[in-house]
Image: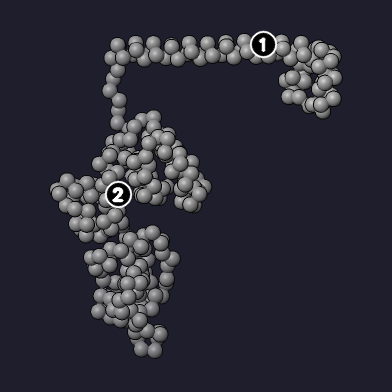
Amino acid sequence: MIAIADITVANPRVRNPRIHKTITDSIEQVGLKRPITVRRVPAGHGPTPYALICGQGRMESCQMLGQKEIPAVILDVDEETAHLMSIVENVARRSPRSVETLEHVRVLKQRGYSDSEVATKLGCTASWVNSVSHLLEHGERRLLAAAEAGDMSLNLAVSISRASDGEIQQLLISAYERGELKGRKVTIVRKIIARRARHGKRLTQGGKSPPRAQMTPEELARLYSKDVEIHRRIQKKAEYTQRLLLLAQQIFKELFSDADFCAVLIDEGLVSVPKPLADLASSSGIAP
């Protein structure tokens, strides 16, 4: 154990707030799992006895939690070697794939562990485990994948999974107004919602929609009949609309041919009309 105040961060990095909060929450709940690495600084060659090689995030989390000391591996290497070690450690660092972590959650929940127990084993928060478990249990892998990719928050994904189709639009509007969804994320989330509506909630392990069962001849015949009926209704609506437009056209043609009607329009100051009506008036020989 060495004092945090005795450590200088030689090459500080900007932390991702979301990831750093996860680290802090994990340390607060289960403690520091891996000590930081520092090098010993010769007397008179630096402001503190030690310089950090790797573990800036862990050290800052401990500071935020009010800890004065931290477990550390102390190496006797020069500054150049320490810098190379820091670069190699950052490049080689491999966070568990999201798919792997989600699979761990699923397996542990199946074995009967509670959310808090799973959180302790995985080094995350119980609320995160609860949200992930909910999405997994309801087959919401599209929403879960979007949350893991950072396209939407996990809370929003859970809210969408619990909402009806009519409520989803309001959820998206509220998220946009809060600044939670902005820029390209809005388009991405809308596409996810559209695919979810078309193909269902569930995805296979490869991230694709499960294949649909082959349709029987009877099912194809019913689908064809339904499609024909839909087109028949569209055609009837189109014909009905066309008849109404022709009727309206004839009515306005006769009105624009009436000099008294045109005079009333002018007296009332109604001298501007929609372009289609103006064209109709011109074709009738009446100046609109």
Residue 106 is at least partly visible in this image: yes
Q: What x and y, as percent, mark residue 89?
A: 33, 65
> Which amino acid, mark 1?
Leu
> Which amino acid, mark 2?
Ser
Q: Residue furthest left?
A: 111
Mark 1, residues whose alpha carbon is within 10 Å: few (<14), some, or many (≥20)? few
Say which element carries label 2.
helix
List the residue tagged with mark 2. 131
Gap in Å between the C-alphas at discs 1 and 2?
59 Å
Residue drawn at x 29%, y 73% as measured from the top left = 37
Question: Which image quadrant is residue 244 in?
Answer: top right
Q: Nearer the viewer, residue 244 or 62?
A: 244
Q: Is residue 17 above or below residue 38?
A: above
Residue drawn at x 39%, y 89% as measured from the top left = 44
Say which element carries label 1.
helix
> Mark 1 or mark 2: which comes first in sequence?
2
Residue drawn at x 36%, y 63% as measured from the top left = 20
Quick check: 29 left or right of 254? left
List the residue tagged with mark 1. 247
Q: What x and y, as percent, mark residue 204?
A: 28, 36
Residue 283 is at least partly visible in this image: no
Quick check: 98 left or right of 14? left
Q: Is residue 258 above or below residue 66?
A: above
Quadrant location, the N terminus: bottom left
Residue 63 shows which numbered tag?
Answer: none
Q: Nearer the viewer, residue 46 or 185?
A: 185
Q: What x and y, as percent, mark residue 195?
A: 40, 33
Q: Is residue 43 above or below residue 82?
A: below
